[in-house]
Image: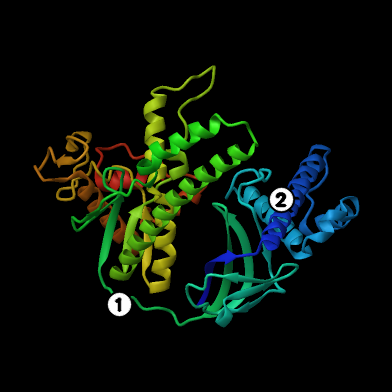
Amino acid sequence: MLRLQAFKYELMPSGEQTRNMRRFAGARRFVFNKALALQQAHHASGGKFIGYFAMGKHLTAWKQESPWLKESPSQALQQSLKDLDRAWQNFFAKRAGFPRPKKKGRGESFRFPQGFRIDQPNSRIFLPKLGWVRYRNSRDILGTAKNITISQVGGKWFASIQTERELEQAVPTATSAIGIDVGIARFATMSDGSFVEPLHSFKCHEKRLAKYQRRMSRKVKFSKNWHKAKRKIQRIHTDIANARKDFLHKKTSAISQNHAMVAIEDLQVRNMSKSAAGNAEKPGKNVAAKSGLNKSILDQGWFEFRRQLQYKLDWNGGILIAVPAHYTSQTCPCCGHVAKANRKTQAKFECVDCGYENHADVVGAMNILARGYRAAACGEDGSGLVRNRKTKPASVKQEPTEVTMHETAHA
């Protein structure tokens, strides 16, 4: 089993090294945007797609036009073209949206695939055209270092070292399976009745963030006081993100270590959190309420929760199964009766057919686990792969039951 893993450390550069890193990140952003503009102009004139190798010839010409580009490492500029080429490939494969220009101050980074050296006993890293840079040595690096990415987050610089190592296929120590229903009132409800309280990282800092944003709006744009206020806002956003990441890592680690199979809902978070504002011709309805719901959904970090569960279960030898979320909280786990009236309130479930009562989120988690079992046992639709099919099965006209609703619903 080949494991790719990244180890991230905070850098402690000198003043000159910090200035150079900003320049390198700016050069990388300049090359990315220039290549993107060239690609768009070439397409508008009816030309064919410019691949990475052909774009590399343009990079040589750009260095002649802008000599200051020569001061930046060639590897970092070449990797910028590779990043753009990968963004185009993802767009053509419908895995991502249309590539957008890089903005100054957002996602400042550059990467070295080779030429760097790591001196972990002395807590320092050698980077081309930067020299030895000290870093906070918080843990050992495992495996062979393949590349290193330098990025700026919240005014600090970090080094992310991607490593590669061979491991034996893990065998799960746990033997249990569990279904998980994610929500807002409860972050995660398990099929065994336990649940995880939400963190609400953004909501806890929302008032403080709004206060500093008002202060920033009163400053003269791009003045020293404006930049000071901006740095305070960046620190708040960093605190929010760090708290959310810490929360998710702890919960996903506990779940992946204690269960061999986990079934979750195949939620499309991007579609669920789309704005309801509409346009001038077709204005949306309940825009304020939908905006608040979108904010709460994104504050939970459902997509990151699923992503972490996926790779951690893979590392521990477990399995993650995503099943459709349709009618999971309206289906009785006892008799299988499906009805909207089964869910009396947001939290209360009471079957109108057999009288079974439980918390609605627990019922949803139980149904998710049942669908996960069926998907794992006989490949029934519910693995999350049905979305990739070009054709849909014919609808079934009969009284809705758990099976028929499951077969006709697609994520």
Q: Nearer the viewer, residue 85 or 130?
A: 130
> Where does residue 325 sit, x and y in percent of width and height?
34, 46
Q: Secondary structure at mark 1?
A: loop
Q: Which residue ends up furthest to the left in the rendered image?
A: 355
Q: Quadrant of residue 64?
A: bottom right
**How many numbered marks appear?**
2
Q: Can you tell which of label 1 and label 2 is closer to the viewer?
A: 2
Q: Residue at x 65, y 64 (%)?
A: 14
Q: Count residues near mark 2 (Cα–Cα under 10 Å), then give few for <14, some for 14-19, many for 20+.
A: many
> Where does residue 401 sit, x and y in percent of width and height?
24, 43
Q: Which residue ends up furthest to the front in the rendered image?
A: 225
Q: Amino acid at mark 1?
A: Thr
Q: Amino acid at mark 2?
A: Arg
Q: Nearer the viewer, residue 22 or 340?
A: 22
The residue indicated by pointer 1 is 173
Q: Quadrant of the C terminus?
A: top left
Q: Nearer the viewer, residue 44 or 159?
A: 159
Res 242 label: none
The residue indicated by pointer 2 is 29
